[in-house]
Amino acid sequence: MKDKVAVIGAGMMGSAIIKSLIKGGYNGQITAVDIQTQKIGELEKLGVKAGLDNCKAAAEADIIFVIVKPGDIEKVLKEINKETRDKIVISVAATVPLAFLHKQVPEAKIVRIMPNLGVMVQASYTAYCYGVNVTVEEKQKVQTLLNMMGLCDEVDEKYMDALTAVSGSGPGYMSIIIEALTYAGLKVGLPRNIAQKSAAQTMIGTAKLVIELNEDPAKIRDMTTTPGGTTIEAIYQIEQSQIRPAMIRAIEEATKKSVQIREKLNLTP
């Protein structure tokens, strides 16, 4: 794939996306633009072209990632508008709808994506949706890029707030579970490094059972549970903690927050 890519906003997520593309075998030119020159300097060592001018980077690119905060997206898109005609513009700004993006860069081919922090290790779950004018060939190009970052699915835009809550914010929830398991391991006498590694790898293994073997989580739970055994005793204690309702409430509130942010910033077309 030889299309030139520009990443406007090479902060934590932008840098992670760039590194995932490189690790995934992307061999086209990548230009990174960010106000923090130190971050760009680190990327230059990987063969990335450094840039300080959003318009220049957009003008030279075929595919433009815009990775800025929702409150900054309008300003950035208006700035590069003249450089986006017939180009693919991929927005990573949470809560910002396709219609709003299209209004700012009406001649661009708009894609809205929601990755998560797993992109740092090519293990993101990325939900994405397209504007109406994106061609089949352009969709294939986008999917190729997103596959380099982990797993991805095209979804109806109406699901993006919920997916922001479930997967976009998901590493935050999963880190709490790993941390809780780690401290539990410490309480029963495990060394810290073993407690943390075993907790994290167990989460990876369980996730692979769900995704790669298409196993139902309830079946995995039952497969580990024997009469009078350790697992059923632990599950009994966990269920008393009301962890399921707590997770459901958390996702509901995060979804509502996504909507509230959009309304507060008036991100409507």
Image: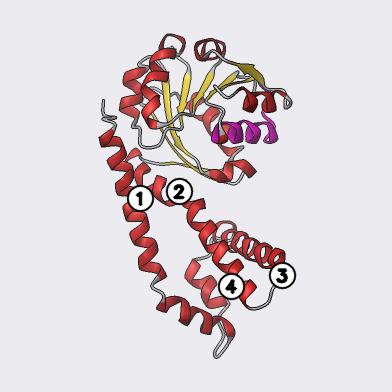
The residue singled out by tag 3 in the image is 191
Q: Earlier in the sequence, mark 4 or mark 1?
A: 4
Q: Residues under labels 1 and 3: Cα distance? A: 35 Å
Q: Earlier in the sequence, mark 2 or mark 1?
A: 2
Which mark is drawn over residue 254?
1
Q: As shown in the figure, which amino acid type bears the numbered disc 2?
A: Ser
Badge 1, how many Cα within 10 Å: few under 14, some, many 20+? some
CB atoms of marks 4 and 3 within 8 Å: no
Residue located farthest toward the bottom when viewing the structure as drawn: 228
Picture quadrant where residue 242 is located: bottom left
Q: Earlier in the sequence, mark 2 or mark 3?
A: 2
Which residue corresponds to the image point at 67% horizontal and 28% vertical from the top-left? 26
Q: Secondary structure at mark 4?
A: helix
Q: Residues under labels 2 and 4: Cα distance? A: 24 Å
Q: Earlier in the sequence, mark 4 or mark 3?
A: 4
Q: Secondary structure at mark 1?
A: helix
Q: As shown in the figure, which amino acid type bears the numbered disc 3?
A: Pro
Instruction: Classify the position of the N terminus by image quarter.
Output: top right
Q: Which residues are magenta?
A: 13-29
Q: Is residue 40 above or below residue 240?
A: above
Q: Is residue 160 above or below residue 108?
A: below
Q: As shown in the figure, which amino acid type bears the numbered disc 1?
A: Ala
The residue singled out by tag 4 in the image is 184
